[in-house]
Amino acid sequence: MYIEEFSNQLNLDQETLDKVKQAMQQFSEQDEKIYVPAVVYLCSQSCQIQQIDGQTKQGNGITLTQIIRNLDPQTDIEQFLMVLQDLPALLKYHSTEFDNVVRQANFSFRLYKKFDKCFSLIQPVQNPSQTPQFKKEDDCDPYISDLKKVAWILCIIVRQNILQYEEQLDKNQLIICDPNTKVILILVGSLSIVFQNIPNTFTQNVSDISQKMLSFFCNDQKEIDEELKYYQDLCFKCINQVVNMMQHKTKVLDMQQETQETLLSVLFEENAIDQTYRRLHKYYEKTRKHSDLDEECFLRQRIVFTPKKDINKQADYSDFETWQKKTKIKSDPPFMQTPLKDNKFSNTQEKTYFDIKKNANPQTPISKCMELHQWIKKITMQTYKCFEDDDDEQGFYNQATININKYFEVTEAQKSQKQHEQVQTILTLCLAVIDSLMKQNEGQFDLKLLKNYRFQFAILGLSLYTYQIVAQKPNLLQNMKQLCTVFEISPLDLFRVIANFAHFHRQMPSTITSQLFELEKHILFNLMWQTDAEKLVEIFKENSPKYFDSELVRRFQNHLALRVKELCNILELDIHDFAYSAICEFMKNPKLSVLKDVIFDTVIICTFYVIQKHQKQSPSFNSYNKLYTKYYSQQKQVFTRIVEYYNEKFLNEFRDIVKSISNAQPLQIPKNFECQSPLIIKQIPVSPNYKQQYIATPEPPSPQKNFMRSLMQKIKPQQQQQQQQQQQQQPQPQPQPQKKQPQKKQQDIHPFQD
């Protein structure tokens, strides 16, 4: 067994080995090469050893470095670290020290992935008159391999020393206080120095390479030129001192001392790169603590191969899915997993794990189908205990079964084993989501929510929707209104929990997240205006400070920006900024008569029409309809009675808005809206109290925000009184006679006639 083999490599004691075997009973043997090392490390940290002096010590001395070094050559380090991060929740083991080690390891590995991406920018220069010195695949060249090791170790050493050096400085002396920003600039600064000193057989335009590296992390590189120059100087000084220590010119690395500059280019020559790596490796091992993670082990090459074929054995493809999963190329996870707040380096193209998966290599229909079935099988093969009272659990189970069968129109006479398994899968997925929300919001999740009908069946509705995605059922969005009717919930109930649902499992396939994105758009643009129009008009009109209200408005605006630009491309128009401004202005004071029972595409298309009329063009709903139906042939209701809607409801409200906006600069659709997903930018927390209007609660109150809000409420009346007094004291100028000038006729927008 692999457990015995791995434990022998680490000389594991018998007590810890017994714990590992007991814990591994929860996992299948197919993924044991990932789960065994993770469980071994967790059990090693949870055990207690009695020392000679009688005191107990937490852990048996096995470090994460030893675990990673002894991983199977086929095991992906990224997948192993993700399993290690989720393992304490599965085995119900909580340790702050363990969580900190794993979090730091994940951070270091994500930084290495960024380093790997930046290092790929250097390219060999080949002289046409000579034989090429390098192969097409640079990573196979021994010089490239050694240079990569040297560069990574230098980045590790420089990062550690600069961060220690800045800890000794006063806060006023720091250029940048954000640790994430520092790490990025130190990485770019260290690599730019390495690239400057590599042989002439490589590209030497280092300034362009620095800008390309920065483009992986931030959008506007011009704003941080000064900070980059500062950290490049620090990196050069640190690397210079490291080289002097390797050459025994100095004994201690001190960033505050000035040292004599060394010719760094000699270190990176082809005949000296191997010796440079050995010296750096020796220095790094000498300075690294035993308990610290050896980040050099990330350089380990992963070996991927197919199983040996036995010609005497009949063909068996049952393991094909497992091998495909193991050999699948993983996409680069986002830096620090979440966007950096108030930071210049928060790249809008690096939002979350789901956005990165969307930009991964395209899947084939077979691989996509296998991924969906494998994911839902992994989720539903476990058991979840969410309800404390068995009667509540049984009541939810009975009512959920009735509603699911009613949605699928299954009677008692038509029930079969397949229908029963279908219901069980949907119910188990629903319980898995609730269980995940309880663990993610531990200490804040109120168990009273488990007795709330709307919360339960909103999660169940999204679980049924997800199951239909896996089963590749057609017309999912068109059937959502029927689902809300059968489950006796409103579309807003689905919206309240959809962000939580999308976050409940970090390995959710991109096919499901993209369909959840489409569902959210369908709710915001279609369903909720047919059921909750009066409530929504009040939310948009009042500009409520409640967290859920503002989140609803913000995500609607994000979807609106995307949809306006998309429809402009479909209808071959170039007025998306004008149309977006007009609709945003209208939504500040929306009218129920315009929005009730409306499909929002109709509002957008009518906005296009009135703008073109104002610009003295000749628009036509018939031409719009022809272009629209090329892409959305099933949504014929968008143009049903659109002329009547435009003349009787729409035109009176939008006529003045278009005229006022035409005299001002129209709002520009932010570029980052094109790559942001309103579904996953910010997760709505689960409410510990359902007495409020919505499930989602406001953000925790801040004393500073409360003080500023009360202060502004006191200041505003005083400012208004002062303005009124000043207006009364000023003498009113008497009107002077003016010559009559011919008034320009204001262009009017007439009703549509056809």
Image: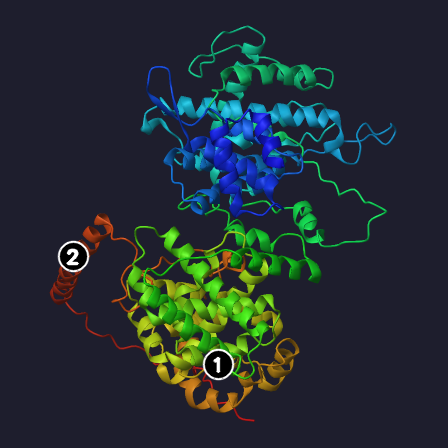
In the image, what residue occupies the spot 40% across and 76% down? 657
Q: Position of residue 617 (x, y in %)?
A: 57, 80
Name the element at disc 2: helix
In the image, what residue occupies the spot 38% across and 18% down? 51
Amino acid on which disc 1 is placed: Lys
Query: CB atoms at circles 2 and 1 under 8 Å apart?
Result: no
Spatial distance from mark 2 to mark 1, Cα to Cα?
A: 58 Å
Name the element at disc 1: helix
Q: Which residue is mark 2?
A: 715
Foreground: 78 or 63? 63
Amino acid on which disc 2 is placed: Ile
Depicted 421 relative to depicted 272: above or below: below
Ranked by sequence position, the earlier of labels 2 and 1 is 1
Residue 275 lies in what quarter of the image?
top right
- The quadrant the C terminus occupies is bottom right
Q: Which residue is mark 1?
A: 406
Q: Residue 711 got which mark?
A: none
Depicted 230 relative to depicted 577: above or below: above
